[in-house]
Image (cartoon, rainbow, N blue to C red):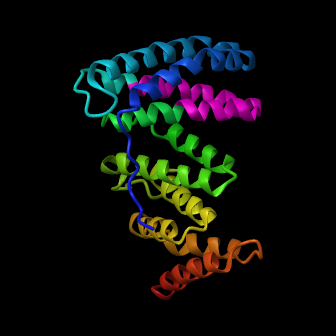
Amino acid sequence: MEIKKIAFGDEGQVATAELLARLPAFRDRACAASPALADRLDRARRGLETLLALDRQYGGSGRVAVEGVEELVSAILADLAHVEAAALRSADADFLAGTADFLLGVAIWAVRHQVSLEPVEPVVNALAHRANAARTKQELAAVFGLTQGILAHVAPRLAADLERSNPERPWRILHANLAITAIRTEDEAMMDHAFDALDEALPDERAGFYAEALALALSPAVAPAVRERIRARHLKWTAAH
């Protein structure tokens, strides 16, 4: 199976419009859980309306050379990060899933238009939630592709990985989650791709990652082929030390 980078086509304008159309109902749910979110979601609505206007003017994909667009995306993500925090406190699974949808929708807009993602942490959290909620291999494959696309987009800024003492840094979490998602798909090509990416991105942590993954893979619920692929990486990096 050939692994391809995630592609975002000209359907971007439709995706932005659909996201905006979902916001009123989501706002009602969010404000029922936390009325203080009203102002943040109203700002997010105005921000999404501007993103849609930019889609209509410049097309659903491609660089948007408009002053202030990166600041706009950052402001929307920052407001949605507060919504995410409220969703986590609420323990409302649907509220949290909806928040992840909006965070990822804005992130995809940024990827389509080659706009920087900052802050990236809430997007990483949204991807993790989407992966944890996935129940079928098709859903997992979709999360894998989306994570791959976000990784490629943030790589120019994060690939140097200068904060190696921080286990919660986005670069580490993205690669670990890509590998875990690949394992759950049981797709050999996806696993090889994710493992190769992790090995290159996190050289200080690969031995520990595969040791932990192998311990979990000893469960009889894990397919033997998956276990052996993890074992091979574990042996490779433990033998190298």
Report x, y in % for residue 19: 52, 24
Q: Residue at x 27, y 34 (%)?
A: 62
Vertical order, 183 against 108 (above or below): below
What percent of the width, then of the height, locates residue 107?
44, 35
Q: Position of residue 43 (x, y in %)?
A: 50, 13
In the visual, does 173 lie left or right of 108?
A: right
Instruction: Determine the residue positioned at 40% across, 26% down.
Output: 13
Is 80 situated above or below 24? below
Depth check, front residue: 138 or 40:
138
Which quadrant does the N terminus fall into? bottom left
On screen, residue 123 above or below 202: above
Quarter of image, res 59: top left
- On whether residue 90 falls in the magenta region, the answer is yes
Near-viewer residue (100 or 239): 100
Q: Please tell me whether residue 100 belongs to the stretch shown in magenta.
A: yes
Q: Residue at x 55, y 56 (%)?
A: 177
Q: Is residue 151 left or right of residue 173?
A: left
Q: Considering only vertical position in the picture, is 37 above or below 16?
A: above
The residue at the point 54 percent across, 83 percent down is 232
Extreme residue toward the left, this view: 65
Q: Main secondary structure of the magenta part?
A: helix
Quarter-of-image position of residue 213: bottom right
- Whole-percent x, y for residue 203 in the image: 42, 70
Q: Nearer the viewer, residue 103 or 234?
A: 103
Residue bounds of the magenta highlight: 73-102
> Residue 24 versus residue 41: which sits nearer the camera?
24
Number of marks in picture:
0
